[in-house]
């Protein structure tokens, strides 16, 4: 009887080889899952640590650079909750042109009226992100990054940046505001503050643009503005306003009214309108902190 070929296997040998293959496959699957698990833990730890250090950095003052606050302003942190009021534009940057005035004229007037209201309330230590000298200086402008440095150096706990909207159509009107968007530090607090502001403007009878007047703004790679509605994660992680991203505190940028619309200007853009808007902002800040306005 001839011997069987060397390459042939018995049933027992085939069974052993099958078990070995199954064991190796199981090991490969196990180690693959282990590696994926460890990579996931690594990234999660990185996110947690990044958020921790971002918030720690945001809560500290910025020793780098020279700002008007560091050069001689009083220590605002000792007098109450430190609130930064940003009059959008100013200096050589006048913003959009409205019906007989520029955007920076409206924002400066509103910001100073709000400052007066808050200075009368000893629970707050408000300050403007630019001085009158800087606002009047036609030779330069305070960049958003410079304003953010000032805000961080002040130890601000809240930021309101005041702007005016414009459109080629004089029929466009309404209020909208932009909090720090999702995935960035202070998003939740900023969202809460924005919803309070929009709610008060809505109660005052103003049209709220978008779903509820609260929206997120991003910039694409060509620096084009992209707007999505509140709650959307569609563009999360994309760059937003520098001031919102770098100020290191809860922050909201408001578009007070359309300075190209007569009814909007009459409501919130002229002298009486700016006072009306300032009162709403003051009420919103008080409500954010769970306080009753004193005026």
Image: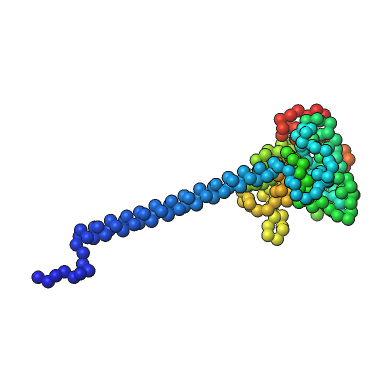
* Residue sitting at x 79%, y 37%: 76
In front: 287, or 65? 65
Q: Position of residue 65 (x, y in %)?
A: 78, 50
Residue 176 quadrant:
top right
Residue name at image x 24 percent, y 58 percent: 15
Q: Residue at x 85, y 35 (%)?
A: 116
Residue 177 appears in view: no
Would you say 229 lies left or right of 73 here? left
Q: Position of residue 120 (x, y in %)?
A: 84, 31
Horizontal side of 48 relative to 131 (left or right) equals left
Q: Quadrant of the C terminus?
A: top right
- What residue sits 88% from the left and 55% below the top? 139
What colour-coding does the image apply?
rainbow
Query: How far across and how far down the image is residue 40, in percent?
Result: 50, 50
Q: Closest to the observer: 81 or 103?
A: 81
The answer to whether residue 38 is left or right of residue 278 is: left
Location of the N terminus (image quadrant): bottom left
């Amino acid at each position: 009887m001839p011997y069987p070929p060397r390459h042939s296997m018995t049933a027992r040998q085939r069974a052993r080889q099958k078990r070995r293959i199954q064991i190796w496959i199981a090991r490969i699957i196990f180690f693959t899952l282990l590696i994926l698990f460890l990579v996931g833990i690594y990234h999660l730890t990185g996110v947690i640590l990044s958020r921790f250090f971002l918030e720690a950095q945001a809560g500290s003052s910025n020793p780098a650079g020279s700002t008007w606050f560091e050069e001689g302003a009083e220590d605002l942190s000792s007098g109450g909750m430190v609130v930064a009021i940003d009059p959008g534009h100013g200096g050589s940057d006048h913003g959009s042109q409205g019906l007989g005035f520029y955007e920076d004229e409206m924002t400066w007037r509103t910001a100073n009226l709000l400052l007066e209201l808050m200075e009368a309330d000893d629970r707050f230590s408000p300050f403007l992100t630019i001085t009158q000298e800087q606002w009047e200086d036609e030779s330069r402008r305070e960049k958003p990054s410079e304003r953010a440095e000032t805000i961080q150096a002040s130890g601000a706990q809240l930021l309101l940046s005041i702007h005016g909207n414009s459109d080629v159509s004089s029929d466009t009107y309404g209020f909208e505001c932009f909090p720090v968007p999702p995935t960035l530090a202070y998003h939740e607090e900023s969202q809460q503050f924005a919803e309070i502001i929009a709610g008060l403007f809505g109660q005052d009878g103003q049209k709220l643009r978008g779903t509820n007047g609260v929206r997120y703004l991003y910039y694409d790679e060509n620096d084009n503005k992209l707007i999505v509605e509140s709650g959307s994660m569609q563009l999360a992680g994309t760059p937003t306003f520098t001031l919102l991203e770098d100020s290191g505190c809860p922050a909201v940028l408001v578009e007070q009214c359309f300075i190209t619309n007569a009814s909007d200007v009459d409501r919130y853009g002229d002298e009486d309108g700016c006072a009306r808007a300032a009162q709403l902002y003051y009420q919103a800040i008080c409500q954010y902190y769970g306080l009753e306005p004193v005026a």
